[in-house]
Image (cartoon, grey):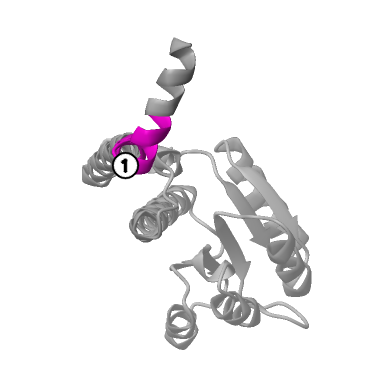
Amino acid sequence: MSAPARLLVVDDDPINRRLLASYLKREGHEVATANDGAEGWALLQREPFDIALLDVLMPELDGYGVLERMQADPVLCHVRVIMISSVEETDSIVRCIELGADDYLPKPFSPVLLRARISAGLGRKRLHDLEREYLEQVGHVVDAAGAVEQGTFEPAALNGVAERDDALGKLARIFQRMAREVAARERALKQEVRQLRIEIDEAKATRQVAEITETDYFRELQRKADALRAR
């Protein structure tokens, strides 16, 4: 049995729709149904689904039309699609596959075969989701590199990536550690520069005082002051 998922059943035949939905619910899946292609398309746009099971022949908007719209949508094109129909002609099957369907099952459906198709579809969906997540997290690391160059990097920005137990997670942890070390060195260097400036200012002030006290004019003033104190 495959792991539970959100499935959409689109079929204009109420008996077929109920039978299919009932079976899928017994398998532990969450199932929504639509009476025709137009209703199914509206549901797909409103709610997230892992797999859509589309009847081929429906009034107004048929399964081909729904499939075409899904493939043209940047989000819905990632939803797995299984076509279920009583039409078993090779041309229909080929057309569905060419339009982007993952599989094609004849009516009446075989529970064993349907279970296998659902399991395979969910496997492909989860593999795609993992790949997309991986690429997104690679993007976070790339963004972090740019932030370091701009001096705006925050190590916490990579916390999510650093939790991975693969090579990308290791890279993120190394990146965080290196960034923290660089930041610590920068803070220490700035402190040294501030201390050096203080010392330079103190030395400059000492020289200025010496330049004044070593003049003949200052010595004469000091002599007069000593003479006044001696009276």
Residue 193 in sight here: no
Specify whether 84 is left or right of 120: right
Image quadrant assignment for residue 159: top left
Residue at the location (24% across, 41% down)?
A: 178
Secondary structure found at label 1:
helix
The residue lying furthest to the front in this view is 231
**Residue 31 at what x, y percent from top left?**
66, 47
Specify whether 167 is left or right of 198: left
**Residue 70 at what x, y percent from top left?**
59, 74
Q: Magenta span has 206?
A: yes
Residue at the location (66% across, 44% down)?
A: 22
Specify whether 122 is left or right of 207: right
Residue at the location (73% across, 56% down)?
A: 33
Q: Is residue 227 above or below residue 80?
A: above
Q: Magenta span has 140?
A: no
Residue 139 in sight here: yes
Residue at the location (63% across, 40% down)?
A: 25
> What residue is disc 1 on?
216
- Report crowding for label 1: few under 14, some 14 to 19, many 20 or more residues within 10 A (C-alpha): few
**Residue 154 at what x, y percent from top left?**
44, 44
Predominant secondary structure, magenta span: helix
The kind of residue on which mark 1 rests is Asp
Image quadrant assignment for residue 181: top left
Q: Is residue 221 above or below residue 225?
A: below
**Residue 191 at what x, y percent from top left?**
34, 35
Specify whether 56 is left or right of 192: right
Foreground: 108 or 39?
39
Bounds of the magenta segment: 201-222
Q: Quadrant of the N terminus?
A: top left
Foreground: 142 or 75?
142
Foreground: 200 or 230?
230
